[in-house]
Structure formats: structure tokens, C-alpha cells
Amino acid sequence: MRKLILLVTTLALVAVGAASFAAFESHLIDVRAHVEKATYVKPNDLNFGVTIMEQKYDAECDAATDPTNANGKCMSIHLSDSFKAQTKFLDVTYRIYCEDKALLDPHRADGNITPFIGLRDSDPADTNDVVDTAAGKGCGAVAYSADPATLNPVQWAHGELVKGSDEVDLWDMSFYAPLCSDNYNPETDPLKPGDQVGGGIIDSKLCHKGPGPDSDEYVDLASNVKFQVMGLSVPAGP
């Protein structure tokens, strides 16, 4: 009897062990995605270069002859090829901000340039694109933030891109090169405070003495302009 019980127990253990290694079938599903942005901007860098005080310089496009900003003459935002290929969303809303250069940004300068820049839509007929500052006046403060961790973004404009009808927005800029305040002569200077964007006068504390006399001054200005996507809309349909 004991041998029979031992045999049955042994067979039971073997059966349990075999069951623990038994399998039926399995399946693998390869889950993947290619992720891209809905928009891109041109150009990556817009440099007015060497400018003369109290003169106006334009970075503008001709929507009739260069509708996609192929030459990179103005700021533009475009729907990406991926967004145009997908079918879930119809349009993209965005905002334009100006902001300080970060402390370690290699292009950080003596102050912001955007207070001296007028912004306007290259296509006035496009009512989706609006400059939020009065009459396209400059954006932000001249002096960088005293807190290096703060970029001080200020909303400058907002717009919308629509697949199939409005896939590129062009934004023109006009830079009014400011005059260092200790060189301003109210009797002879054509530019008076308040005449142009930001008043056209920059505090001489931000200016540098040049190699010539004290009146030989210069100032370097630079800002970030950020295009921030705010939303995507689902197309109407069944």
C-alpha cells in the first residue's frame, strides 16, 4: 500500500511539474509611432546686421511673389508635411511671444531688440492673424530681466493655420535703430521720443563707448521670438 501511495504521489508531482512548463500559444504586436511637430518656422536666425542709429530696416516678404518665404526674408510659420498628411486635425492655433535672451545664450546682448521692432501680418486679408500690441508697436522691455532665470515672455501676436487653405503665415518686421540717449539732440535729430517703436531712444547706460570720441557709441540688441502652438482642432464631420 505504501508503495502504491508513493507511486501515485510521484506521478502527481510529475504531472504538476509538467503543467508548470506547459504553454498553448502566444502573439506579439509591434507597437510603434513616428512623432513629429505640427509646424515649423523660418528662418532660424534673423539678423539685421550692422545698422545706423535712427534708420529703419525691414525684414519683410512679398506674399504675392514669395508666398512660402523661400528666401527667408521675414518670419514665417508653416504646417509640417506630417500635419498636412494626417486626417485627425484641421487647423493649428499659435501665439507669438518676445522674450529675453537667457543668461548663457551666446547671442545675449546689451538689451532686447523687440521694443524697437514693429510687427505686422504680411497678408492683411488674413483675419486669423492679429498683432496684439497697439498698432504693431514694439514688444517687451529694453533691459533684460534682473533675474537670470526669468525670460519675461510677452505675447506679441496670435494666428491660425488651416490645412488646405492657409498653410503658411508670413510676419513682417521693421526695425527702427535706436539712438543712445546722450547723443540725442532735440533740435536736429529727426527722430523724437515716441515717434517710432519704443520711442527710438535707448538709455546710454546700455551703450558702449567706441574707439573714437565719447560720442562714438554702439549697442548690441537681441531677443528671442517664440512661436508657441496653443491648440489643434478636430475637423467637423460624421
Image (spheres, helix red, strand yellow):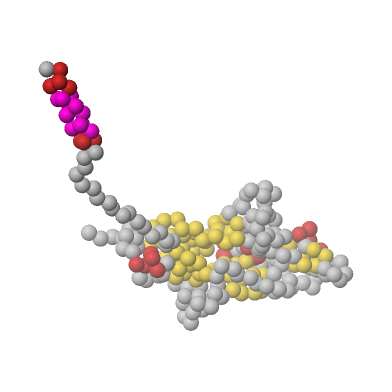
Can the viewer see residue 115 in this picture? no
* Camera-side residue of 197 and 193: 197
Residue that appears at 82% across and 68% down: 210
- Name which quarter of the figure residue 184 lies in: bottom right
Q: Horizontally, is 90 left or right of 157 in the view?
A: left
Q: How many marks?
A: 0
Furthest residue to the front? Answer: 3
Q: Horizontally, is 173 left or right of 207 in the view?
A: left
**Picture coordinates of residue 215, whole percent (x, y):** 84, 68
Residue that appears at 54% across and 75% down: 72
* Camera-side residue of 22 and 45: 22
In this picture, is 22 found above or below 124?
above
Furthest residue to the bottom? Answer: 65
Q: Horizontally, is 152 left or right of 214 in the view?
A: left
Furthest residue to the right? Answer: 213
Q: Which secondary structure type mostly characterizes the magenta part of the structure?
A: helix
In this picture, is 129 found above or below 149?
below
Residue that appears at 60% across and 63% down: 137
Residue that appears at 65% across and 74% down: 57
Can the viewer see residue 180 in this picture? yes
Identify the magenta region. 7-17
**Picture coordinates of residue 33, whole percent (x, y):** 36, 57
Quadrant location of the N terminus?
A: top left
**Picture coordinates of residue 155, whole percent (x, y):** 54, 56
- Name which quarter of the figure residue 4 lies in: top left
**Picture coordinates of residue 124, whole percent (x, y):** 48, 71
9 is within the stretch colored magenta:
yes
67 is within the stretch colored magenta:
no
Quadrant location of the C terminus?
A: bottom left
